[in-house]
Amino acid sequence: MLAYFVYSRSRLAPGKSPPLHALAVLPFHNLQPSAADDFLGYSLADAVITKMGYVSSLGVRPSTAIEKYRNQAIDVHKVAADLNVDTLLTANFIHEGDDLRITYQLIDAKSDKIKGKGTFDVKYDKLLRVQDSVAQEIISVLELNLTPAEAERIKPDRPIDPLAYEYYLRGVDLHGRHDFPLAIQMLEKSKDIDPNYALTWTYLGASYNSAAAFQFGGSEQYNKARAAYERALSLQPAQLEARMFLANLLIDTGRVEEAVPLLRDGLKTNPNHAAIHWELGYAYRFAGMLQESVAECEKARQLDPLVRRTNGSLLNAYLYLGEYDKFLGSLPDTDDSAFVVFYRGLGEYYQRDWGEAAKNFDRANALDPTLYTQTGKAFSYAIAHRDSEGLEILHNLEGKIQQRGVGDPEGTYKIAQAYAALGDRASALRVLRYSIENGFFSYPYFMSDPLLDSLRHEPDFPSLMASAQKRHEAFRAAFF
């Protein structure tokens, strides 16, 4: 595989300036709330966000960051501070019969001054025009200078069957609500009516992928997700969302070497895309390129300080480098995310703060019993010397992974660590082998990880490390 260029660790790509504006496009507010129309609020905002993601001079907050503002009264200063932006776009809509009226404002968050505002009417069967009209207003009011390539990419999309587009927007809304099965139903309907709209395939892939990752789906769902992403890219090769989502799937299913070119090419399209930098850091972490992983994630946070809140790929490279205080400091200050609370417990476990670690492991599992949080519960049982109960959890998790036919290799590595903590070295080695063979080969971490110390004198351990080292060094040679 040909080596791609390496990004500077301390600055943005040469010749590229950081974004001039940080913008949040808030969910559109339905002035006549109804179950039939409310889906438009989030999905129309998402369409604008997606369109503006190709403009490197504008930092646009992702849809995951603005989802919580559905149907909320907006305090401009508070929301802008929360999202760390200088400009907000707010909009209202009314749907009556065949007509849709959109009223919008671009607001300077510091001065409260309205930079631009307007109203436009579209027929309901022309919903696709909304994103183009709002995007052009943003570009005009903020006086953004687009490169020729950017101007080409944000041109109006090809026409799509109106009913197919409505199903697409409904699917996007449901995906944002984490109702993945129903999102799949809507998006399948959309692509059956009009199979040539690339973003339908992208969100269909994302819904299948999310169902597989978060709801213990099986390999069949991962395969459907990959096929959907590949169809999206066949229709629109430069689409950033499909590239980023496919890369994440490839990383999680053991093919990180295929993910890196997708992400690096995405950064050629927009070198200031925070989420792609973060995803590249995720890929590097799996391959054991830990300093490079930190550099990409820190660059992402330079571009969007909120990226750690809206992206599940936490800054684990600090943990893997043994920089536990930095790792804990990198976590969002929240107690309502099971994923974050689990990782806070894991950082405390490495620091041997057993009481706090157990408390956070227990809380995370109570919030949401996933592969990660149930593994944390097993760690909590290890702290309490309730080994049989911890081992029962881990055996059940292994069974689910085998039943699915695919598993998150980084999450599986944590099961191996928990087995080691509970004294079951044979199971720890078995699961460690599975993790390495399925794509988590962070060799430098393995060699220094204190949670593997009880395994280092086992006969099979050197061969497992040799396997991880070989792939790690091949990755380094290919990409650095």
Image: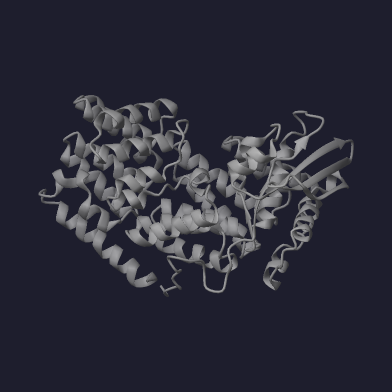
Judged from this view, the residue extending furthest toward the front is: 111
Q: Position of residue 375 (x, y in %)?
A: 32, 34
Q: How many marks are shown on the rendered structure?
A: 0
Q: In the image, is residue 398 above or below residue 380?
A: below
Q: Position of residue 345 (x, y in %)?
A: 33, 35
- Seen from the viewer's position, the closer of residues 22 and 417 is 22
Q: Position of residue 14 (x, y in %)?
A: 52, 73
Which colour assignment does the render follow?
one colour
What residue lies at 66% left-to-right and 62% top-to-bottom?
55
Query: Which quarter of the rendered picture does the N terminus lie within?
Result: bottom left
Q: Is residue 117 visible?
A: yes
Relative to 190, 114 lies left or right: right
Relative to 153, 327 lies left or right: left
Q: In the image, is residue 429 above or below residue 277?
A: above
Relative to 165, 171 lies left or right: left
Q: In the image, is residue 298 above or below residue 330?
A: below
